[in-house]
Image: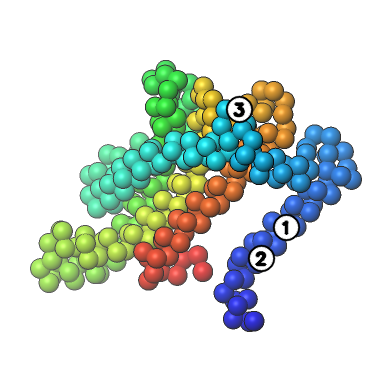
Amino acid sequence: MKKVYEKYKRIYWGVLGIFIFICIWYAATKFTGFGNIMPDPITVFGGFFRSFVKPIGTKTMALHILISLSRVLVPYVIGGVLGVIVGVLMGWYKLADAILMPYIQMIRPIPPIAWIPLSIIWFGFDESSKYFLIFLACFFTIAVTTYNGVHSVDDTLVRAARMLGANDRQLFTTIVLPTTVPYIFSGLQVALGSAWATIVAAEMIRSSEGVGWLIVRGQDVGNMEQIMIGIVAIALTGLLITTLMRVLENKLCAWTVRGK
């Protein structure tokens, strides 16, 4: 039993924490005035599971989630690829660092929602505006973490490899890349969470489906239950995709002990 507990204690405490939170939520809605403005968890989760059968708008919950995931996937992949390339360039070449880092440090603190007016002007109301906002939520995080990963490479190893005749390609594949990969995955995981969180802002731009639309539409009509259903959908889907990313990271970066 002790071995089983040690293996699954993270899941055990996580489930226990969620259960306690739901109990507090239920008690607050039933025994205080909080229930006048907030539906209880039984109503919210019941509505969430019913939404997989009964459509909200024109789509069921499964389709709303898949639509939002598709909107996240494209800019996330583009932002990930470009972020890794830019991060490596800045970390390995001082000239690229001097040119690009000031722009990144200036633009990175600007939240994606602040770009909504410009994204509408530049890209209109179609999917490109949403892609642009989510790209911004991904690119800078991945670029900076990759940059930090390249900078964490031990200079002694690099000098020793050069003395043994290693060229730049060999240095990158045998020293730089193995050291940087855990940082890249860390950035990808954080960026995935940021991208998924940004979907609400992205779907404020004239959408008729998606989990972000559920919240925006619920706000427009004053439907608190629909707002909470949308929040639950975002939370559970975000937990699932970040957990899958962590499993992938543990498989591909088995030599690290991060997150244990």
* Residue drawn at x 15%, y 58% as measured from the top left: 168
Quarter holding residue 160: bottom left
- Calculate the distance from the C-alpha at mark 2 to the C-alpha at mark 3: 37 Å
Q: Type of residue at label 1?
A: Phe
Q: Is residue 202 above or below residue 187?
A: above
Check whether the beta carbons of the residues at disc 2 and disc 1 lie within 8 A of each other: no
Could you tell me if residue 41 is visible in this image? yes
Q: Secondary structure at mark 3?
A: loop
Q: Are marks 2 and 3 in contact (CB under 8 Å)?
A: no
Q: Which mark is residue 13?
A: 2
Residue picked out by circle 3 = 57
Give the number of the disc on residue 19: 1
Task: Point out the frontmost of discs 1 and 3.
Answer: 3
Q: Can residue 90 be seen in the rendering of this structure? A: no
Quadrant where the N terminus is found in the figure? bottom right
Question: Closer to the observer: label 2 or label 3?
Answer: 3
Determine crowd level at label 1: few under 14, some 14-19, many 20+ residues with C-alpha closer than 10 A.
few
Kindly indicate the quadrant of the structure image that contains residue 234: top right
Where is residue 108? Give x, y as percent.
43, 38
How far separated are the C-alphas under marks 1 and 3? 30 Å
